[in-house]
Image (spheres, rainbow, N blue to C red):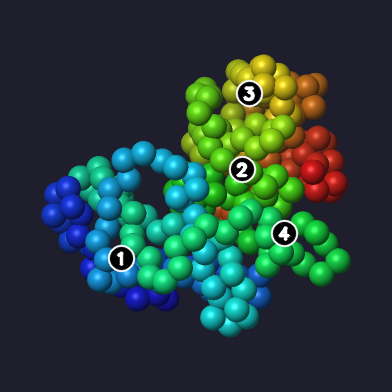
Amino acid sequence: MSERVPVRCPACRREHRYAAPAYPCACGAPVAPPVDRHGCATPVAHRVWAEDWITVRCARCGRDGEWPRPELGCPCGTVLRIPVAGTDARVEPGGDADRRPGDRRPALRPAAIRTARDAVVAAALYLRRLGHRDVRRTDRRLPSGVGLTARGVLAQVDPTVRPASLRDVECLWLTAMAESAACLYFSLAGYTDRARARADALGIPLFVLDLTGVPRPVNAPADALHTAGG
């Protein structure tokens, strides 16, 4: 359990006690970002994908890993970015530190899904494991959820409690077609029968994100992608 430190919201001056979440390293040890107890939290006004990640070194094995930057939601509505001590550089996706012997794909390090942001992180990590090094949030609006893009691929991440619909799947496919990109869908609540049937017909891989943060393929195109590794 990481140390709880005081964090003051600069918008409403409310003080919180914050403990950074721990994520499992490839060696199995829990890794938590070292919060700078003397730093000041800053409001998140605009999302920049590169700023959502930090490098954290595992104390047990010395492996550098890429983890979500700590954040805290204040009841006043402000999202606070928590200052981190030490290195603050972003690991380039697909670095050799995440490679397993005999396998050029990064090892998947699932993190429990508690928020919509956790679902986006889980999908981004999976895309990187498939070999997409330049994963970032897309500026294009999708009917629901968050869009992630990399060279030649567009993914939709739906963290709602509503199963993805036929319209959701078709809109993703049309958007990807306009960008000459392949597409895939990550949903927290699954898919309607019509959505799955349409995805099968269009060859769209469908994944369900379970609460452990592991994407599970739920149709044949997703099975093929998962097996081939992209």
| Residue picked out by circle 4 | 106
Residue drawn 80% across and 21% down? Answer: 201
Along the line of sight, the residue nearer the viewer: 167 or 31: 31
Q: Compared to 184, does 127 lie above or below?
A: below
Query: As drawn, is 166 to the left or to the right of 87?
Result: right
Which of discs 4 and 3 lies nearer the camera? The answer is 4
In the rendering, at what x and y percent does residue 83 appear? Answer: 33, 62
Query: As drawn, is 37 to the left or to the right of 22?
Result: left
Q: Earlier in the sequence, mark 1 or mark 2?
A: 1
- Alpha carbon of mark 2 to alpha carbon of mark 4: how far? 14 Å
What kind of residue is marked 2?
A: Val
SS for dot 4:
strand
Q: Residues within 10 Å of mark 4 (few under 14, many from 20)?
A: many
Q: Which mark is residue 225?
A: none
SS for dot 3:
helix
- Alpha carbon of mark 1 to alpha carbon of mark 2: how far? 29 Å
SS for dot 2:
loop
| Residue picked out by circle 3 | 172
| Residue picked out by circle 2 | 135
| Residue picked out by circle 1 | 18
